[in-house]
Image: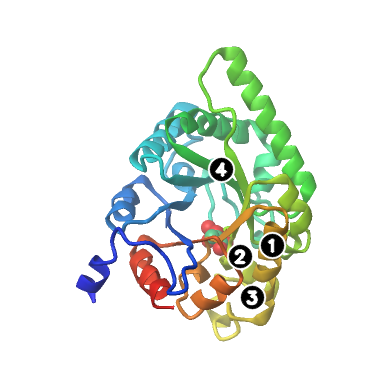
Amino acid sequence: QKALLEQLKGKENITKEGQKINVYANIGNVADLGAVLKNDAGGIGLFRSEFLYLENETYPTEEQQFAVYKQVAETMAGKKVIIRTLDIGADKQVDYFNLDKEENPALGYRAIRICLTRPEIFKTQLRALYRAAVYGNLSIMFPMIISVAEVKKIKEIIEEVKDELKAEGIPYKEDVETGIMIETPASVMVSRELAKEVDFFSVGTNDLTQYTLAIDRQNSKLDEFYDPHHPAVLSMIKMAADNAHAEGKWIGICGELGADLELTEEFLKMGLDELSVSPAMVLPLRKRIRDL
Ligand code: PEP
Ligand code: MG
């Protein structure tokens, strides 16, 4: 089996009928870069930037973040690297943020909600990202979006950040591809409007399943009810895909479901453009695609 997968390195992700799809890898740390290269991923579809905050005693500085994003961009040598902005709160708590204890953390103050209400934290990360984008093929993705208004607000903040960098004479990339995660039912329902505002969608099926089925993804007592193959979840992915494509934008999946080989055929039928999976799943998924 291992030798078989080894033979797939350097090969395309293409079905027998000629349909192609990008297969990228999800990472949570620069230490995972070796596995991305070793498994011949076409790019990085989700870099969870939280580790920078989780492993630090206080807010990571712009320079600290810049160094990491630059390293990832350079290591991937022109291949796409999608970095997700800070997604803490809920299951990921960081002491120095001093977040209040909440009744319903998964429905609480987290991710983009923190970034939009504490723009100084958000701007530091965006500055580092726009600067690092000079060194490779970097894209930026925003988590937990529910509305067009949020995306418009993000764009305003990006403009401010670029104006400031320009005024300071610091090199940055003017046009960086930006996308959002589709991981709330609200984002699916307004996906046609959202698609007009961004360059791409990436479906976070872990949270999308949690919020669609109203089942806490952390509560193992509910495992028998947590069904990511639920038709409601699959219909939502299809709806987001149709709306993305209607606006000429691309869409991928970066949640766990992207690696579910039982669904690969269905995802190809939906016309998904990309699947981003753990590095170890890149070659098994490539095999599945090529066998279809
Ligand atoms: C998701 O929700 O599917 C996702 C990819 O993000 P995370 O698992 O980090 O919440
Ligand atoms: Mg998520």
Q: Residue at x 46, y 45 (%)?
A: 81
Q: Residue at x 34, y 52 (%)?
A: 32
Distance between the alpha carbons at the discs numbered 4 and 1: 18 Å
Distance between the alpha carbons at the discs numbered 2 and 1: 7 Å
**Closer to the camera, 35 or 80?**
80
Classify mark 2: residues with Cα within 10 Å, few (<14), some (14-19) or many (20+).
many
Q: Nearer the viewer, mark 4 or mark 1?
A: 4
Distance between the alpha carbons at the discs numbered 2 and 4: 19 Å
Task: Specify whether tag 4 is near ligand 1 (CB below 8 Å).
Answer: no
Three-letter residue code for mark 2: Asp
**Secondary element type, mark 3:** helix
Distance between the alpha carbons at the discs numbered 3 and 1: 13 Å
Mark 2 / mark 1, whichever is N-terminal: 1
Task: Specify whether tag 2 is near ligand 1 (CB below 8 Å).
Answer: yes
Q: Above or below — where is 201 with respect to 258?
A: above
**Secondary element type, mark 1:** loop
Mark 3 / mark 1, whichever is N-terminal: 1
Three-letter residue code for mark 3: Leu
For the question of whether residue 74 can be seen, the reply is yes
**Secondary element type, mark 4:** strand
Three-letter residue code for mark 1: Thr
Check whether the beta carbons of the residues at disc 3 and disc 1 lie within 8 A of each other. Answer: no
Q: Above or below — where is 64 with respect to 247?
A: above
Mark 2 / mark 4, whichever is N-terminal: 4
Q: Nearer the viewer, mark 2 or mark 4?
A: 4
Q: Which residue is mark 4?
A: 140
Q: Which of the numbered marks, if any, corresponds to residue 234?
A: 3
- Residue 210 as seen in the image, left or right of residue 82: right
**Closer to the camera, 1 or 277?**
1
Classify mark 1: residues with Cα within 10 Å, few (<14), some (14-19) or many (20+).
many
Check whether the beta carbons of the residues at disc 2 and disc 1 lie within 8 A of each other. Answer: yes
Q: Which residue is mark 1?
A: 184
